[in-house]
Amino acid sequence: MTDFADLAQAMGAAGADHDRLMLAVDAAVELIGVCAHAGVTLNRQGECLTLAGSSEVPSMANKLQNETAEGPCHVLDRDEETIISTDLPQDQRWPTWGARVKDELGIGSSMSLLIFTARGSYGTLSLYAERPRAFSADDLATAQALAGHLAVSMAASREIMGLGVALASRTVIGQAEGIVMERLGVDSDQALAYLKRVSSHTNTKLVDVALTLVRTRQLPAAGAQS
C-alpha cells in the first residue's frame, strides 16, 4: 500500500468488511510513521469491541477501556469526531486508563476518529503512538482521510449488499407469483394480492411467504386465501 489511490482500489476490491478494516489499520501504520498500532473499535452497549487491529495492542487497549470504564471509545454515541490525547498518563479525562495504557502497553499518545457517513457510524479508528505528543497536524489530516476512505468504502459495500438482497427478494416473489398464477389460474396482480393476504393473515413477511412457496411448491392453507 503506497498511497490513497492504492488504498481506495484495494478497499473496493475487498470481499468482506473485515478485509476493508484490516486494510485501513495496516495503512494507518504504514502511512503515519509515528503510529505504532491501529485498530477499529465498535462500542456495543457500552462495551468496546475490537473489529480489526494491526497488532494485539488495540484489543488490549479496548480491554482496559472496558475494565476501567474510561477511554475515548468507551462513551456510547459520542459526539466528537476526533479525540486526541497528547500525553495519556497525564490525561485527566481518563486517569486510570491512560496510566495503565502507558504502563502496560507502552503507549504515550493516541488519536480516535469516528468512521461515519450521513447514513450511519461504523465505529472508530484508533491510532496509538509510543511517545507523548507524537502526532502532528499532518498525521491528523492523514488519519482523517483514512477514516473518510474507510467510511465511504463501508457504506458502498453495504449499499451493494442491500441492493443484492432487494433484487433477490423481488426475484423470489416473482417466482412465487408464477406458481400462484399457474395453480389458481389468476393474473400477476391477483397472484401478488393473494401472497399479500397470506402474509397479512399469517403475520409473515411477504418474502418469507414467497420463499416457503417456492421451496415447497405447496399453496398455503385455504383459510389464508380468504
Image: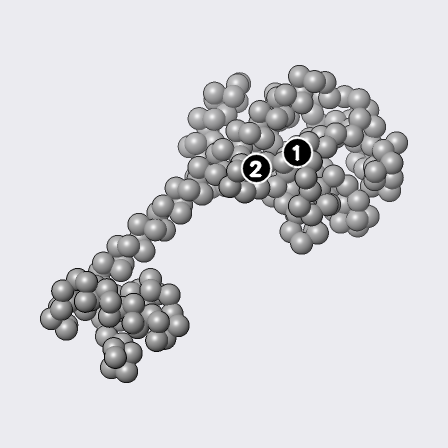
The percent position of residue 218, horizontal first and vertical second, equals: 23, 74
Left or right of 188, for residue 196: right
Residue at image position (77%, 41%) is 71
Residue at image position (33%, 70%) is 199
Residue at image position (67%, 54%) is 45
Above or below residue 162? Residue 3 is: above
Looking at the image, the residue that sits furthest to the bottom is 223
Label 1 sits on residue? 81
Element type where label 1 sits in the image: loop
Label 2 sits on residue? 116
The percent position of residue 205, horizontal first and vertical second, equals: 37, 65
Residue 148, image quadrant: top right
Left or right of 154, for residue 78: right
Above or below residue 77? Residue 134 is: above
Above or below residue 159? Residue 137 is: above
- Which residue is nearer to you in this view: 119 or 219? 119
Instruction: Please say whether residue 64 is visible from this viewpoint.
Output: no
Instruction: Give the residue type that dot 2 points to.
Output: Phe
Residue at image position (59%, 36%) is 115
Mark 2 neighbour density, 10 Å: few (under 14) some (14–19) many (20 or more):
some
